[in-house]
């Protein structure tokens, strides 16, 4: 391809280049709007605040991106996060020893991954559709979380457990949740763009039968995306529990819907095969900045929800409209 | 009887293929008219034109004395043309009676359904078509042939003047066929016409008043069965001897790559044995629906193997899925490029690398960008995929021929020695077709073993070293590819070779 000046430099990373420029423009306009309308929005403190607030959603959304790009869906993200957070908090109470906090965080993440493994096994072995499977595990997971906590907040967690949610790597500059978010982003980007697994994920999402006939181990790919989605949900739940300093069975309610909204806002197709991790970043930023900006403007939370929903519909609507037009143009040519 | 249907100069072209050219014939009132032709002769296109599903490019259709323009399926039905397709479009979770009245519900005052009326009428009509089918049964519980009979009942409810049957007996039992023929007889007596498409010549000779043969989209002959002997009919269907660029025979048969012994899938095919050697092009010939694609999918592990064994003399494990097949050195270019070949929105590069991405990655699965680029460039150049420099574009933006080259390139890049090519040139233009033929020859010359499935007699004769003729799930004949005649091939596919004992003597 070196002989062709129009050839892309990295041929196989098509999705990154297709990340919607309009999406970032929308984000920029949103930021400009709040800079003008929301005094105090444009400050280092608030910037850090936004990053810290978005980290839980972002981490869960990065994992969910794998699921959605592969053509799957995970509705159990919120209850997986709650249950993982509760279990991590319980583990921290038991392991009140040096290194116990770290071990308990790990317990939450591993439990989350196992939860995802169960989702993946049910979907591939029992051939139950993802939406039904994860609707079932969503309900079971929430029930289990209420059961193990007895429906009350789980306090008495050692203060060291709060390190992952409230701590800083560089005090006042780089909070741990933000650092973890960036690390997960880089890992997800590498896995989707630079690994064989990434090619398989997009192939399975784009045309499952073609992927199967091409010799891709479709079921294995599917199980893995749910394990990844589960692990990030678990990690998000641990960070949240750590920030709250307690295990709460009712936390993260509806997180899965925000996660799906963010990934779809980022240009992913809900039927799979399309999307990019940078799109997910943009989607999370839009949702988080909307929430933050409106809070500063003292907009009632009820309106915040309405605006977030409208933003989703408008962004996806514009995207669909443009795709239809460019699709017609390609077919003519 | 005056003609109910007159076709005059009907033409229809698809990109790269003239499906119908100036077809002229007529169907008389009260006539059972058989339409015959090999795969790709244009029968299906003609039915679609008559049903209003496809617009003709030129020609006139007169139906019942009225010249008709471009119609849509609804108009055709209103005029009295009913089509019974091989896979009838019914709603599986509704009852037989509800399906029969779908779209023509009987309603009374307030628009409420007159269900009892419907049930009674449905029961009447089913009793005349297939009395053993319960009108209250759910369509999902019926076999394919029973569904066809339900669709027939639905068609008869409109009292069509012309009924078009597209290979109705392919999956029917003897009892169902007898019932169908009784209905056809009744329609003939009532002065209604039937256009009957079938590959089963004995049926045609027993019920048709006249027969029309199409070949390569052209009208070849219309004759009464009494005036045209069966061997002559077969010759008309097959056409003269085809001379196309014939590939030179492989000099030495190479080592065996894949040995299939007594393969069988219950109810689909059985007793299929063959060996694919290095450097050889082995063709599976036969009619559409004979079981060729099913055999290929089973070898690939995409469908279960109920009987028989597949061995890989070069070493290869038992194949349970296409991923195993790939490890054993078998890759496929599937039929139906859009549905099972390409991943439409994924880039040309990723589509090419799909089966071999692990080969350009390190041990932890990270892709080496330079090696990936080199592999893609290599494939693009080897297969001459155009436009150049488009490897980052979604594959769906390429032409059909180039999409097919991408799928072929993927199979080649996988390193598989055995390549299964299922209709590799279906629906692509003539230029790309010649290129793909050349690529297939080159691959064989380089030591690949190729299993070619094609419905095109010419393609098989031009490429194959050996031809396995499959009919109704069985291997009926093996022909030497070089020097085989199209007549021989079509005759075997139709199951007509035994009707000419004179040759043997």
Image (cartoon, rainbow, N blue to C red):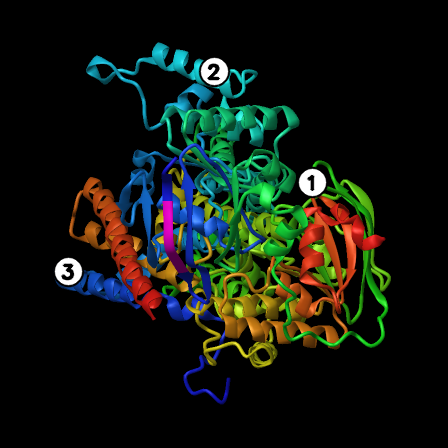
Chain under disc 1: B
Q: Position of residue B374 (x, y in %)?
A: 59, 81
Secondary structure beneath dot 2 equals: loop
Secondary structure beneath dot 1 equals: loop
Horizontally, residue B60 falls left or right of residue A40, namely right
Label 1, on which residue? B268
Q: Are marks 3 and 2 in contact (CB under 8 Å)?
A: no
Q: Residues within 10 Å of mark 3 (few under 14, many from 20)?
A: few
Chain under disc 2: B
Mark 3 vs mark 2: in front: 2
CA distance separating discs 1 and 3: 73 Å
Q: What's the residue at 57%, 49% (across, down)? A: A222
Label 3, on which residue? A39
Horizontally, residue A289 falls left or right of residue B377, namely left
Rendered image quadrant of residue A215: bottom right
Chain under disc 3: A
Mark 1 vs mark 3: in front: 1
Q: Earlier in the sequence, mark 2 or mark 1?
A: 2
Rendered image quadrant of residue B359: bottom right
Q: Which residues are magenta?
A: B6-12
Vertical order, B198 against A28 (above or below): above
Residue B106 magenta-highlighted: no
Q: Disc number at residue B29?
A: none
Q: Disc number at residue B136?
A: 2
Vertical order, B19 against B96 (above or below): below
């Amino acid at each position: 391809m070196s002989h062709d000046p129009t050839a892309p430099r990295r041929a196989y990373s098509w999705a990154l280049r297709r990340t919607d420029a309009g999406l970032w423009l929308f984000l920029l306009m949103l930021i400009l709007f709040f800079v003008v309308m929301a005094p105090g929005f444009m400050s280092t403190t608030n910037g850090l605040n936004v990053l810290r607030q978005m980290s839980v959603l972002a981490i869960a959304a990065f994992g969910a991106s794998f699921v959605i790009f592969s053509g799957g869906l995970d509705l159990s993200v919120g209850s997986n996060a709650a249950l993982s957070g509760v279990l991590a908090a319980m583990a921290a109470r038991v392991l009140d020893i040096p290194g116990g906090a770290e071990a308990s965080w790990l317990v939450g993440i591993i439990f989350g991954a196992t939860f995802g493994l169960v989702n993946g096994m049910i979907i591939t072995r029992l051939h139950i559709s993802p939406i039904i499977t994860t609707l079932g595990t969503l309900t079971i997971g929430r029930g289990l979380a209420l059961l193990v906590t007895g429906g009350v907040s789980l306090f008495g967690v050692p203060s060291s457990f709060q390190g992952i949610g409230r701590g800083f790597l560089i005090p006042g500059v780089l909070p741990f949740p933000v650092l973890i978010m960036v690390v997960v982003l880089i890992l997800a980007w590498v896995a989707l763009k630079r690994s064989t697994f990434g090619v398989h994920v997009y192939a399975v999402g784009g045309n499952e039968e073609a992927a199967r006939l091409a010799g891709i181990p479709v079921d294995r790919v599917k199980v893995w995306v749910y394990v990844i989605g589960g692990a990030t949900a678990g990690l998000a739940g641990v960070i949240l529990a750590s920030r709250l300093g307690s295990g709460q069975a009712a936390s993260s309610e509806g997180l899965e819907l925000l996660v799906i909204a963010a990934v779809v806002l980022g240009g992913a197709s809900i039927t799979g095969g399309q999307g990019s991790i940078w799109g997910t970043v943009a989607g999370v930023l839009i949702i988080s900045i909307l929430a933050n900006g409106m809070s500063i403007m003292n907009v009632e939370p009820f309106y915040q929800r309405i605006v977030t929903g409208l933003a989703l519909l408008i962004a996806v609507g514009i995207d669909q409209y443009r795709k239809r037009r460019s699709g017609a143009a390609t077919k003519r040519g | 009887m005056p003609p109910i249907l007159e076709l005059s100069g009907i033409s229809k072209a698809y990109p790269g293929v003239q499906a119908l050219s100036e077809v002229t014939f007529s169907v008389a009132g009260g006539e059972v008219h058989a339409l015959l032709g090999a795969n790709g002769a244009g029968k299906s296109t003609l039915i679609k034109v008559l049903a209003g599903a496809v617009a003709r490019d030129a020609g006139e259709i007169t139906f019942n004395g009225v010249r008709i323009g471009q119609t849509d399926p609804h108009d055709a039905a209103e005029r009295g043309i009913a089509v019974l397709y091989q896979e009838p479009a019914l709603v599986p979770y509704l009852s037989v009676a509800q399906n029969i009245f779908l779209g023509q519900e009987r309603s009374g005052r307030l628009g409420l359904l007159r269900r009892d009326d419907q049930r009674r009428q449905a029961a009447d009509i089913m009793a005349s078509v297939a009395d053993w089918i319960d009108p209250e049964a759910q369509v999902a519980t019926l076999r394919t042939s029973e569904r066809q009979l339900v669709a027939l009942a639905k068609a008869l409810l409109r009292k069509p003047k012309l009924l078009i049957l597209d290979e109705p007996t392919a999956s029917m039992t003897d009892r169902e066929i007898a019932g169908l023929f009784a209905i056809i007889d009744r329609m003939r007596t009532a002065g209604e016409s039937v256009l009957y498409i079938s590959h089963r010549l004995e049926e045609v000779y027993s019920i048709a008043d006249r027969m029309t043969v199409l070949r390569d989209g052209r009208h070849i002959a219309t004759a009464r069965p009494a005036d045209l002997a069966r061997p002559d009919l077969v010759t008309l269907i097959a056409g003269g001897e085809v001379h196309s660029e014939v590939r030179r025979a492989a000099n030495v048969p190479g080592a065996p790559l894949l040995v299939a012994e007594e393969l069988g899938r219950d109810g689909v095919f059985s007793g299929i044995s063959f060996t694919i050697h290095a450097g050889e092009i082995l063709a599976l010939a036969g009619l559409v629906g004979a079981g060729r694609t099913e055999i290929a999918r089973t070898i690939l592990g995409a469908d279960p193997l109920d009987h028989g064994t597949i061995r890989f003399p070069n070493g290869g494990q038992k194949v349970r899925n296409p991923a195993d097949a790939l490890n054993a050195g078998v890759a496929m270019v599937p039929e139906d490029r859009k549905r099972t070949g390409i991943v439409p929105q994924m880039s040309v590069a990723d589509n090419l690398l799909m089966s071999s991405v692990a080969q350009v990655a390190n041990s932890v699965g990270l892709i080496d960008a330079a090696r990936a680029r080199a592999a893609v460039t290599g494939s693009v150049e080897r297969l001459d995929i155009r436009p150049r420099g488009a490897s980052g574009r979604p594959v769906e933006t390429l032409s059909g021929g180039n999409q097919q080259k991408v799928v072929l390139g993927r199979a080649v890049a996988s390193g598989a020695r055995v390549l299964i090519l299922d209709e590799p040139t279906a629906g692509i233009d003539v230029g790309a077709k010649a290129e793909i033929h050349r690529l297939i020859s080159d691959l064989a010359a380089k030591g690949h073993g190729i299993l070619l499935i094609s419905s095109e007699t010419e393609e098989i004769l031009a490429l194959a070293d050996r031809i396995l003729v499959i009919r109704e799930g069985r291997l009926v004949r093996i022909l030497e590819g070089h020097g085989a005649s199209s007549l021989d091939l079509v005759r075997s596919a139709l199951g007509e070779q035994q009707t000419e004992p004179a040759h043997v003597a």
